[in-house]
Image (tube, rainbow, N blue to C red):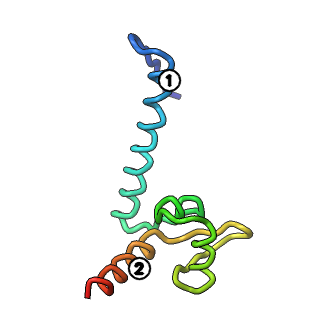
C-alpha cells in the first residue's frame, strides 16, 4: 500500500475548508464529463436532476408523471439519464426558436 504525506503551510484551516469542497466538486464534474464522453450513461438522482434543471421537486414529479422526462429506479430511488435530459432540452429549444 502506498501512503502519501501532504504538508500544508501558510494557509488557515478555514481557507483549506473553503478550497477542498470546490476542488472536489470540480473533480466530480470532470469525472462525470469523462464518463459521458466515453459513452457511459450518467444517471442523476432526483436531487441532482432538480439542481441541474433549476426546478423544484414538485415540478420534476409532475414532468415525470406526465411522461415529459423518463426515470428509472431501484426500489424507492429514482434516477434520470443526463443525456436524455440534455437531448430533451435541445429538442425543446429548437421547437421554441421556430
In the current view of this chain or complex, which residue is farthest to the right? 75
Residue 38 percent coordinates (x, y) = 35, 63
Q: Which mark is residue 88?
A: 2
Within the image, what quadrant is residue 39 found in? bottom left
Where in the figure is residue 33, as x and y percent of width and height? 37, 57
Numbered disc in front, either 1 or 2: 2
- Place of residue 18 in the rendered image (x, y in percent of width and height, measured from the top left): 46, 29
Marks 1 and 2 close (CB-CB < 8 Å) = no
Neighbor class of circle 1 (other Cα within 10 Å; few <14, some 14-19, many 20+) is: few
Residue pictured at 43% horizontal, 37% vertical: 22
- The residue wearing badge 1 is 3
Q: In the image, is residue 82 above or below residue 21?
A: below
Q: Position of residue 66 (x, y in %)?
A: 59, 86
Of residue 9 and residue 41, the one placed in the foreground of this image is 9
Spatial CA distance of label 1 from label 2 is 46 Å
- 57 sits left or right of 20 in the view: right
Relative to residue 31, is residue 89 depicted above or below? below
Identify which residue is drawn at 61% across, 75% down: 72
Identify the secondary structure beneath mark 1: loop
Name the quadrant of the C terminus: bottom left
Residue at the location (43% across, 30% down)? 19
Amino acid at each position: 500500500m502506498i501512503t502519501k504525506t501532504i504538508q500544508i503551510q501558510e494557509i488557515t484551516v478555514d481557507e483549506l475548508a473553503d478550497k477542498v469542497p470546490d476542488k472536489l466538486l470540480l473533480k466530480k464534474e470532470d469525472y462525470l464529463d469523462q464518463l459521458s464522453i466515453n459513452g457511459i450513461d450518467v444517471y442523476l438522482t432526483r436531487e441532482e436532476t432538480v439542481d441541474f434543471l433549476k426546478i423544484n421537486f414538485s415540478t420534476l414529479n409532475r414532468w415525470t408523471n406526465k411522461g415529459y422526462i423518463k426515470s428509472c429506479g431501484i426500489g424507492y430511488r429514482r434516477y434520470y439519464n443526463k443525456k436524455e435530459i440534455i437531448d430533451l432540452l435541445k429538442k425543446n429549444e429548437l421547437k421554441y426558436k421556430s
